[in-house]
Amino acid sequence: MSQSISLVSFNILEGLRPLMSMPNERRLVDRERAEAAKAVVQECAPDILVLNEALFCRQYEEKSIDYANLFSFPYQVSALYDNEWGNAILSRFEISAYEEMRIYNRGGLKARIESPQGPLNIASYHPHPHRNPENKAHDFTRLVEGISGPLIVCGDLNCINPEDSVNRQKLVTSFERFSETPSETLDRFIESGKHVFKSLSELGLKDAVPVSGRRYTIPTDLISINKDSAIRIDHILANQDVTIVGGEVVHSRQSNKASDHHPVMIEFYLTTGD
């Protein structure tokens, strides 16, 4: 059997920029966070790396960041939305095609990757946390509807899988530290999960991370040592043409330093025909 393929999905928090950027800040990238992010990727050693909040992944206002070079990948596609904000898909295998999906203030990205086991479709979309749950679901349907063959959808989906158990009262109380409307904020994550996972399940996609690996993805220690607000909002889903052999939300010393989100990883094979 061919060697399995691995994928990491990672929200890298505003393109790894300094968290307290000053008007005359000369560093486009926070070197300490970038080194931690590179260490995370090196430890996971994925064949495919999908990045959300990949700011300046294309040139904007005479600034750009070469994420493929930063993380040592030979192939890359990327797209901006809402000025410098963007998504990027990096691969060790050739990327033969890609396409953007745009709404008024956000964008999705999908790519066709020529893996050693055959063509593989990767799609990523990071919806705004305040977007209406039904509209989030519609966006994801629009992103991947009509794609045939092996398909993986991943990213910071800003929603909670309905299969994940949550302590609502504990979360509402913890959300009071950073939200003026904690109940509404939590309920939006929960309702978004119901709609998004239902819509994607109707297209044959399901949570690709084994139950044993479904740890929280936010917050990391970089943002808060207190984990009362911990939830899993970063996901990887796959269809029936992708056979999962392992996966987890990666918690490590370096992932706690690199971003406010922990990365998500899966290992898989493409299902072969008879």
Image (cartoon, grey):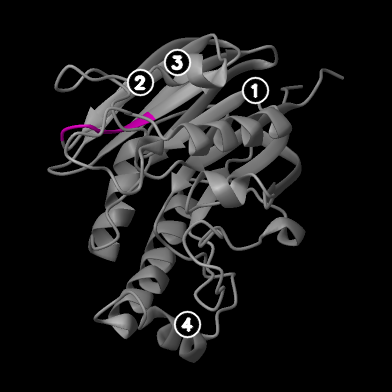
**Residue at 50% across / 52% down in the picture?**
261
Which circle marks residue 171 in the picture?
A: 4
* Residue carrying label 3: 76
Q: Amino acid at mark 4?
A: Leu
The mark that comes first in sequence, 3 or 4, is: 3
Q: CA distance from mark 3 to mark 1?
A: 12 Å
- Residue 270 shows up from this direction: no
State if disc 1 and disc 4 touch (CB < 8 Å). Answer: no
**What secondary structure is marked by label 2?**
loop
The mark that comes first in sequence, 3 or 1, is: 1
**What secondary structure is marked by label 1?**
loop
* Residue carrying label 2: 65
The mark that comes first in sequence, 1 or 2, is: 1
Q: CA distance from mark 3 to mark 4?
A: 38 Å
Side of 44 relative to 110 (left or right): right
* Residue carrying label 1: 47
Q: Quadrant of residue 88?
A: top left
Which class describes the residues within 10 Å of circle 1: few (<14), some (14-19), or many (20+)? some
Q: Which residues are magenta?
A: 83-87
Side of 15 relative to 8 (left or right): left
**What secondary structure is marked by label 4?**
helix
Q: Quadrant of residue 228?
A: bottom right
The spot of residue 186 in percent (x, y) is 38, 76
State if disc 1 and disc 3 touch (CB < 8 Å). Answer: no
- Which is in the foreground here, disc 1 or disc 2? 2
**Residue at 64% across / 48% down in the picture?**
208
Viewer-side residue, 63 vs 41? 63
Quarter of the image with the N terminus in it? top right
**What secondary structure is marked by label 3?**
strand
